[in-house]
Amino acid sequence: MIIDCHGHYTTAPKALEAFRQQQIADPSARPATPSISDDQIRESLEGAQLKLQRERGTDLTIFSPRAAGMGHHIGDGNTSLAWTQVCNDLIHRCCTLYPDKFVGVCQLPQTPGMPPTNSIAELERCVKQLGFIGCNLNPDPSGGWWKDPPLTDKWWFPFYEKMVELDVPAMIHVSASCNPNFHTTGGHYINGDTTAFMQLITSDLFKEFPTLKFIIPHGGGAAPYHWGRYRGIAQDLKRPLLKDHLLKNVYFDTCVYHQPGIDLLTKVIPVDNILFASEMVGAVRGVDPETGHYYDDTKRYVDALTLGAADKQKIFEGNARRVFSRLRR
Amino acid sequence: MIIDCHGHYTTAPKALEAFRQQQIADPSARPATPSISDDQIRESLEGAQLKLQRERGTDLTIFSPRAAGMGHHIGDGNTSLAWTQVCNDLIHRCCTLYPDKFVGVCQLPQTPGMPPTNSIAELERCVKQLGFIGCNLNPDPSGGWWKDPPLTDKWWFPFYEKMVELDVPAMIHVSASCNPNFHTTGGHYINGDTTAFMQLITSDLFKEFPTLKFIIPHGGGAAPYHWGRYRGIAQDLKRPLLKDHLLKNVYFDTCVYHQPGIDLLTKVIPVDNILFASEMVGAVRGVDPETGHYYDDTKRYVDALTLGAADKQKIFEGNARRVFSRLRR
């Protein structure tokens, strides 16, 4: 079985976007829940995520709302909560229509400057009532201005306590950038990953929360490529070896869109810490003229590795089942 | 000959730091030029950069003030100019004392919100009077808040015109972060590189300035590791192929502190676009227990590549002479 741990509902029916546009036009507005039929949902998935699953030979996608669409910086806590619930409910409908193809991970109702405790109720609702198995945690709800405390600050601890209690991991995933310096998927996403990883090096967060689990997407941002730098900085800072300090709690996905990148990832990071993912339908939608295949068809890159079958099984399935523990239930 | 294109004067005599502390305590103060003897300069270099050059077998370092020390966010334009001139003059003294070992690259008197035209006079002074061959350009003078326009904005064009006129490249290099989310050397530096690279993808800057040359340090941030992603995003954005769009103007250094990273860099990026560098004495100062050698002894990683002698000569010397054209004079 092949589990893709990072897929977003980027193809949702237009009524969802219309709801959002009403919110953006007037953040204090309370638009009606968008009217979307089951057939519209099926149609939005059949020609996209489901088609690609079939073509590429992947089985199950751990599925969450469009990351760039989370837009936590828009409006206030009420705006964010209303939008988040609409998005999560739609993911739940996808998972209900295709229970063998999708399992849910939730967006959180974060808002810049508002404590992460505000996200606890929605996490609990999604896990307990909707059967979701994880969440996407935005380390920068301000959308490229980085105004909230680092992930290692006590500010976040009540939320982590709930994650631990519910036994769900978080993928650390920023949303759209409204800072003109940062292109969303090419700058802000990768910077968010790198930033989070370096924050974790400097802290003892996992002493405080030994069973907390984070997935750093997009192949861990720059971390594996600069693994020597990060080992060296940790050493200069008198931190433990990264494998002891972070790798019982931190995982990387395989959203790296060329063979040399996946080769490096799997050479540098222990196989137990790598989860298969494609981010489809996502940041890059084209076909690579150098290979004739979709850039984001990351299964091909993993297939091409010289790893043994047991290691590939870990990347494709075993690690996801371990990290997303509720998937087994 | 081996040219290290990225070295900082991180070991300057204490009088320099005392000057800076006076400025920080009172940004409107005008402290006297720090009194530093030639012997103090020799001593600061002999046990550090010069010792490492000898031990590692490198010949010439393209040398600039400590990057984390630039601190463009401190004080106003006058503070920044006074500090910059003191730092650049000290680099000039190093280069004068050891003309075969160091050649200067200048810090710029940038200030958040102030137009880059303010840096033109100091660039001109350093190049024409002090014999410097390039500059370090900070894409985020606000120190981690990213408040100024992207590098591709017309805001920067008058400065680029002067770079082109003087025929000097810029290394795109942020300074210390005062945003608690970003560790300076582990987060902000690498993000700065990634951010700049992605900014360049979205623009036609090099159509406007066909002879403008940028070096993206620290192995290009995350760019080579995510080369497939960047090729794919450029393609989705209907940009030209990266090799045509950027690689006549953009270069990467080899400040990547482990063999797999350097392997990837040289596999993905054309050899003509890679400049040898170590960033010594810099971000990582320890010895890698996995190799028994300094993390930042990047010459070992390049030596270990299976590239031919002609390609290695390009990385070690030829490309630096081409990019830093004034070095030949």
Image: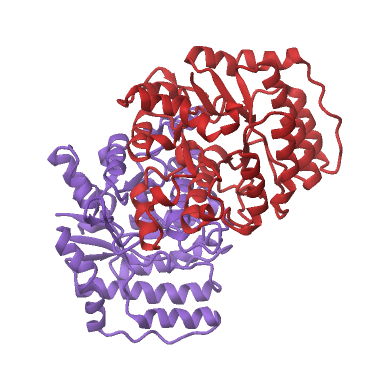
Chain colours: A red, B purple
Question: Relative to residue A120, is residue A32 drawn left or right?
Answer: right
Give residue A273's position: percent from left, percent from top: 43, 37
Q: Residue at x 48, y 68 (%)?
A: B71
User: A329 or A100: which is nearer to us?
Assistant: A329
Res. A53 in view: yes
Q: Residue at x 39, y 25 (%)?
A: A312
Q: Quadrant of the C terminus of chain A?
A: top right
User: A137 or B157: which is nearer to us?
Assistant: A137
Q: Residue at x 78, y 47 (%)?
A: A77
User: B157 or A301: which is nearer to us?
Assistant: A301
Question: Relative to residue A292, is residue B28 drawn left or right?
Answer: right
The vertical placement of A309 against A78, above or below, is: above
Give residue A310's position: percent from left, percent from top: 37, 25
Res. B157 in view: no
The vertical placement of A74 against B66, above or below, is: above
The vertical placement of B73 against A26, above or below, is: below
Q: Quadrant of residue A258?
A: top left
Give residue B103's position: percent from left, percent from top: 25, 64
Give residue A49's position: percent from left, percent from top: 58, 19
Question: Relative to residue B325, is residue A152 drawn left or right?
Answer: right
